[in-house]
């Protein structure tokens, strides 16, 4: 494949950094990483590629039209992969304005910078103009609540009960033609940006592609998201807050599998098309948390004596142990009455957030059929790799936990 220059927005974020690492480590392409470096951006995730001659970093805001125009003129990209976004649902509930600004306005600014650059290419380098691609990365959350969609189509007028879990398991999946029905400020902002990208393709003929992915997980994930939050809270002996009854269902995609899929779409996908990317790993949130606990029970056994959670205190006496200050200790300093506990004891059910969708699930058959991509990791192998990574990289996540985020669930207004 001809060597290309990729301009990647949000390349210091969780998914973006995985794409950058994949391109630098496993291709001959050049990468220009454009990132504003918000709280979720972390250049340490790129430490193993930052010295490459094929890697360039530019700190810039996609809402800055002048900066975007300059970057296109300076680097002359062949491919734009747009991952820069505010991405946390709970934060969007607490403060939606920032999501509208970055995800909607920022996407429009970037599209205009790309269109201006592409028009110039058409005048001076038609071959490069024909090969140019603008790849917009989005989410399955734009489709709304799959369980709700299925219930509206399956229930009879006399039947008012929700679908059973068995019915949901056999319900159809989100496809590339599923109508949009976003439920949160975050998903609405991403749906808006998706529509902008498609409008630029239909109106101006810009060579765009869109991908919608399921929930990602893996190394370097910011600890406000479910899986890293549960891992780090469990390691600290803190409560593991689970929304509602924990029966919300998500499809989980290992981030390195996703990175490979995104590059596949950017380089081989058909202009104007949408591709869903999923991991074939539907799990309830509670099962995800319990599985993390089981892996940690094996790899990092907990012997915490007491855990404080919201509205409740687990006392040491109730666990059949003495307080740590007791003089009755073994020669090695271990408490003789200490009862080994599972990390599952830390699970705490908290008030569900507003507009919490019950189920997301992706039909990824199109990308598998047309581009030959399939995920390599199962949920079990990917989650174990993720837990092992956090256990081995305490220095990284402790630096991330700088005091601005305290391991709580956000978005309960």
Image: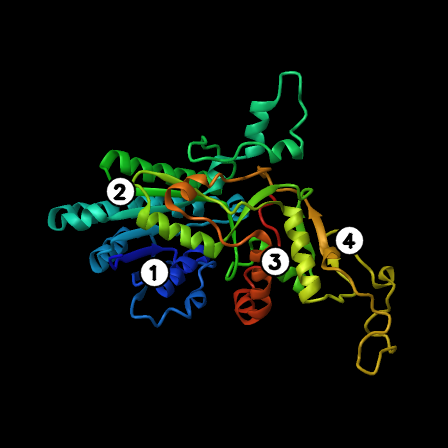
Q: Are marks 1 and 2 in contact (CB under 8 Å)?
A: no
Q: Dot 1 lies on which element?
A: strand
Say few, some or many: other residues with alpha carbon within 10 Å of mark 1 (under 14 / 14 to 19 / 20 or more).
Answer: many
- Upstream in the sequence, badge 1 or badge 4? 1
Q: Classify the position of the C terminus by image quarter.
A: top right
Q: Dot 4 lies on which element?
A: strand
Residue at image mark 2: 207
Picture disc at residue 407 = 3
Say few, some or many: other residues with alpha carbon within 10 Å of mark 3 (under 14 / 14 to 19 / 20 or more).
Answer: many
Q: Residue at x 45, y 52 (%)?
A: 258
How far apart, in angstroms, are the residues tagged by discs 1 and 2?
Answer: 21 Å
Where residue 180 appears, x then y in whole percent?
Answer: 45, 33
Residue 236 visible in rendering: no
Q: Nearer the viewer, residue 235 or 413?
A: 235
Q: Nearer the viewer, residue 398 or 389?
A: 389
Picture disc at residue 128 = none
- Mark nearer the viewer, 2 or 3: 2
Residue at image mark 1: 33
Q: Dot 2 lies on which element?
A: loop
Residue at image mark 4: 312
- Upstream in the sequence, badge 4 or badge 3? 4
């Amino acid at each position: 494949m001809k060597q290309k220059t990729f301009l990647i927005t949000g390349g210091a974020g969780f998914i973006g950094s995985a794409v950058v690492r994949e391109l630098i480590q496993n291709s001959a392409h050049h990468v220009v990483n454009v990132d504003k470096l918000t709280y979720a951006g972390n250049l340490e995730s790129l430490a193993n590629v930052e010295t490459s001659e094929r890697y360039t970093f530019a700190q810039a805001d996609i809402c800055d039209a002048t900066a975007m125009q300059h970057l296109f003129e300076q680097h002359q990209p062949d491919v734009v992969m747009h991952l820069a976004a505010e991405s946390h649902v709970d934060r969007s509930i607490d403060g939606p304005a920032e999501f509208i600004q970055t995800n909607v306005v920022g996407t429009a600014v970037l599209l205009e910078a790309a269109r201006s650059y592409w028009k110039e290419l058409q005048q001076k380098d038609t071959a490069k103009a024909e090969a140019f691609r603008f790849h917009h990365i989005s989410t399955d959350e734009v489709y709304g609540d799959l369980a709700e969609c299925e219930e509206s189509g399956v229930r009879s007028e006399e039947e008012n009960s929700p679908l059973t879990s068995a019915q949901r398991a056999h319900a159809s999946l989100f496809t590339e033609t599923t109508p949009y029905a976003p439920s949160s400020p975050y998903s609405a902002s991403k749906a808006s940006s998706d529509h902008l990208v498609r409008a630029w393709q239909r109106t101006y003929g810009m060579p765009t592609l869109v991908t919608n992915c399921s929930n990602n997980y893996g190394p370097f994930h910011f600890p406000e998201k479910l899986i890293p939050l549960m891992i780090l809270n469990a390691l600290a002996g803190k409560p593991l807050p689970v929304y509602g009854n924990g029966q919300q269902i998500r499809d989980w995609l290992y981030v390195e599998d996703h990175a490979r899929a995104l590059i596949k779409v950017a380089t081989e996908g058909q202009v104007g098309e949408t591709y869903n990317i999923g991991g074939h790993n539907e799990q309830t949130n509670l099962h995800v948390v319990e599985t993390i606990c089981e892996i940690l029970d094996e790899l990092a056994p907990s012997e915490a004596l007491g855990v404080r959670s919201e509205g409740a205190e687990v006392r040491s006496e109730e666990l059949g142990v003495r307080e740590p200050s007791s003089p009755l200790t073994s020669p090695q300093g271990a408490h003789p009455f200490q009862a080994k506990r599972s990390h599952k004891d830390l699970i705490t059910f908290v008030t569900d957030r507003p507009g919490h969708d019950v189920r997301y699930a992706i039909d990824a058959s199109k990308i598998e059929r047309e581009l030959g991509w399939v995920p390599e990791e199962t949920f079990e192998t990917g989650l174990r790799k993720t837990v092992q990574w956090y256990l081995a990289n305490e220095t990284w996540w402790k630096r991330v936990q700088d005091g601005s985020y305290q391991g709580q669930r956000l978005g309960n207004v």
